[in-house]
Image (spheres, helix red, strand yellow):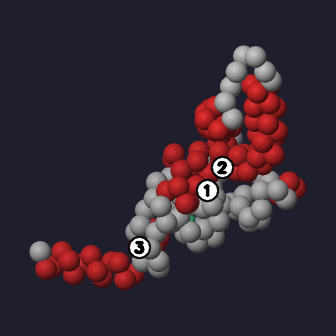
Amino acid sequence: MNNIAKTETETACKEPAKAHNYFWTIFNQKCPRCRSGNLFPDNNSYHLRNLFKMNERCPVCGQITEIEPGFYYGTSYVSYALTVAFSASTFVAWWVLIGLSTTDNRLFWWLGINATLMILLQPYFMRLSRTIWLSFFVKYNSRWQQENDTA
Ligand SMILES: [Zn+2]
């Protein structure tokens, strides 16, 4: 028991910082393997010129970001799921906060506002989709440093 505890502390000391959780990683567009390197050199999704500019490798752990040619075509599935999830949440929020009725235009207001929000959030969503897609294939590895050393 003592020995196990000791090895655990030793490995913990070698790790740089406490790892962030999955959702933090996704929302901040970090590398899924080390959870600290940036996937995109320009952190602001709204600098549209750099929207799809990704680091070829994670600047922290060296994980390749484009696993195979055309890897990011699959992001459209994630993007679609995000769109549906987002619209469903705004719909429920609208329903609860403002209400819906067949006798007035509240439903159409929701449609318009939801569509506008979707357009405004599109650059962020596009990056979010890529980050989520990559995280499906690259799992978090707290021992990436040791593995890089042996490789
Ligand atoms: Zn990394």
Cβ atoms under marks 1 and 2 closer than 8 Å = yes
Residue 127, image x, y percentages: 70, 50
N-terminal-most mark, 1 or 2: 1
Task: Give the left or right position of residue 141, taking residue 101 as reference.
Answer: left
Cβ atoms under marks 1 and 3 closer than 8 Å = no
Q: Is residue 69 visible?
A: no
Query: Residue at 63% across / 61% down in the picture?
Result: 28
The residue positioned farthest toward the front in the image shown: 103
Q: Secondary structure at mark 3?
A: helix
Q: Mark 1 = which residue?
A: 27
Q: Mark 2 = which residue?
A: 128
Q: Secondary structure at mark 1?
A: helix
The residue positioned farthest toward the left in the image shown: 1
Residue 17 position (above or below residue 138): below
Q: Secondary structure at mark 2?
A: helix
Q: CA distance from mark 1 to mark 2?
A: 7 Å
Query: Residue at 77% across / 52% down in the picture?
Result: 52
Residue 101, image x, y percentages: 70, 21
Q: Is residue 56 visible?
A: yes
N-terminal-most mark, 2 or 3: 2
Q: Mark 3 = which residue?
A: 146
Quarter of the image where the N terminus is located: bottom left
Query: Residue at 41% across / 67% down in the picture?
Result: 142
N-terminal-most mark, 1 or 3: 1
Kind of residue at disc 1: Phe
Q: CA distance from mark 2 to mark 3?
A: 29 Å
**Given this view, does label 1 or label 3 mark the residue nearer the observer?**
1
Residue 97 position (above or below residue 135): above
Q: Residues within 10 Å of mark 3 (few under 14, many from 20)?
A: few
